[in-house]
Image (cartoon, rainbow, N blue to C red):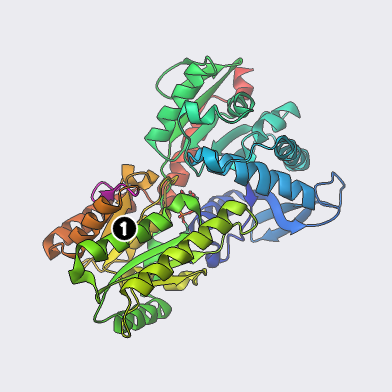
Amino acid sequence: MGRLVVVSNRLADPRKPAAGGLAVALGESLQKSGGLWFGWSGNISEDGASGNDSNLHMRNSGKVTLATVDLNRSAYESYYEGYSNSVLWPVFHYRLDLANFNTSHLAGYRRVNQLFARKLKPLLRDDDTIWVHDYHLIPLAAELRALGCRQRIGFFLHIPLPPALILAAIPQHEWLMRSLFAYDLVGLQSEADVAHCMHYMTTEAQATLQDDQRLSAFGATVQVKAFPIGIDVQEFQRLGRSQDAVDTFESVRNEYSRRQLLLGIDRLDYSKGIPQRVRAFRELLERYPDNVHSATLLMIASPSRDAVNAYVDLRQELEGLCGAINGDFGDLDWIPVRYIHRTVARKRVPGLCRASRVGLVTPLRDGMNLVAKEYVVAQDPEDPGVLVLSRFAGAAEQLRDALLVNPYDAQGMAESIQTALHMPLAERQRRHSALLENIQRYDIHWWREAFLATLQSSATKASAA
Ligand code: ADQ
């Protein structure tokens, strides 16, 4: 394989462990091939989004070249806050009620994808393999092809792909989905997403199915396949053995020594089912009073997309729900819900997970959900906690040994939490070891290698031409 070129909305320096599993995993391939990572700098400047030569920043991190462009305020608002996060994010998470189909958003989204293509093209070599990430950049391959690029191009969607009739609510859905045919390979998180994509393409785009993975339409063929993303298990285990993680574990264990701790860690996003989790916890206290003065819900929600209205509403709703439970059930020596609106340092995550008897991962929809996998890996195999997982997370297709719940059903979820809190040790161990085996087998390295190997063996647009 020639050089790998990764394109994503934001970049992370792959040599910094704080960048997280994905950046580190992509960084490994990039380092090996001496690759290029291209995306938005994160800066908003007056001159941003312009085609000027000055709007391209290059720096090296080891053998990897990081190339970024700035955006101006209006491009940022229409491309990022607008089309990406007020149309694609809600619709792809089945939330048509939260979508804002303002036509100027689409124009900005197209302009930024065109800008990315124009800026990237001169940096490309003929034998590069290009890997584009996520919903911000769906039409990028089509823009690159329009400029004459013939390289292999793969796309991975980190969020769910909804059923055809939900996608069809996007006014420009034909254009959006058609642009996927410019890729050689489209990777999705789950088999359910693949089924939705196949159904959309055959019914709405009149595509023909070549085999169970290949679709043809508009004179092109694309391969569509599930590659469920994993975590860097060894790195997370290493982090769990570090002094910071051990200190976090001990201080949380000591503080809650008389309590049963339930943990939720998420970005504060309406897809994560955070208010539903709090309602289920309230149900738990009402229906199973043995948990009063004992069960404690620790929720750490990192700030996210504060400028989008739906996120402001969510924050208010959550604060109201937590305040009401603490007012109704709390006592001088017990606060039932501790809600922290903050990103905790990554090195503290394994200790928090290990100190919690139950991990509550309850999204209404989620592409995968890596917190579920991190929770399992952080557990003590001799005395593991129990993962309570929404059946609507992509991870539920793999993690069948979690306690699977429906987050819309507060009563059912409360029952499952009660089951988790009373689960015998032998069953906890059996479930944990089955989950861990799956997570170890399908880790982030498996994901990256499986995607790139499939992309390498896919028929390229160039050879088809
Ligand atoms: P997210 O929705 O951001 O991303 P998720 O899978 O939930 O991703 O993982 C979030 C990561 O951030 C985890 O590593 C977690 O530990 C960390 N994190 C979350 N909240 C935190 C907090 N308050 N403090 C510290 N760390 C926190 C998208 C999709 C997912 C998909 C991923 C990867 O929405 O469905 O799993 O990409 O493809």
Does residue 242 show up magenta in the picture? no
Badge 1 residue CB within 8 Å of ligand 1: no
Whether 380 is drawn above or below 208: the answer is: below
The structure residue drawn at horizontal position 36% and vertical position 79%, both measured from the top left corner, is: 246
Name the amino acid, label 1. Ala
Q: Which residues are magenta?
A: 399-407
Q: Quadrant of the C terminus?
A: top right
Is residue 375 or residue 447 the one in the foreground?
A: 375
Q: Position of residue 221 (x, y in %)?
A: 55, 20
Q: Which residue is mark 1?
A: 280
| Magenta-drawn stretch, dominant element (helix, strand or loop) | loop
Q: Quadrant of the N terminus?
A: top right
Q: Position of residue 165 (x, y in %)?
A: 48, 26
Whether 318 is drawn above or below 246: the answer is: above
The structure residue drawn at horizontal position 60% and vertical position 34%, both measured from the top left corner, is: 153
Could you tell me if residue 28 is visible in this image? yes
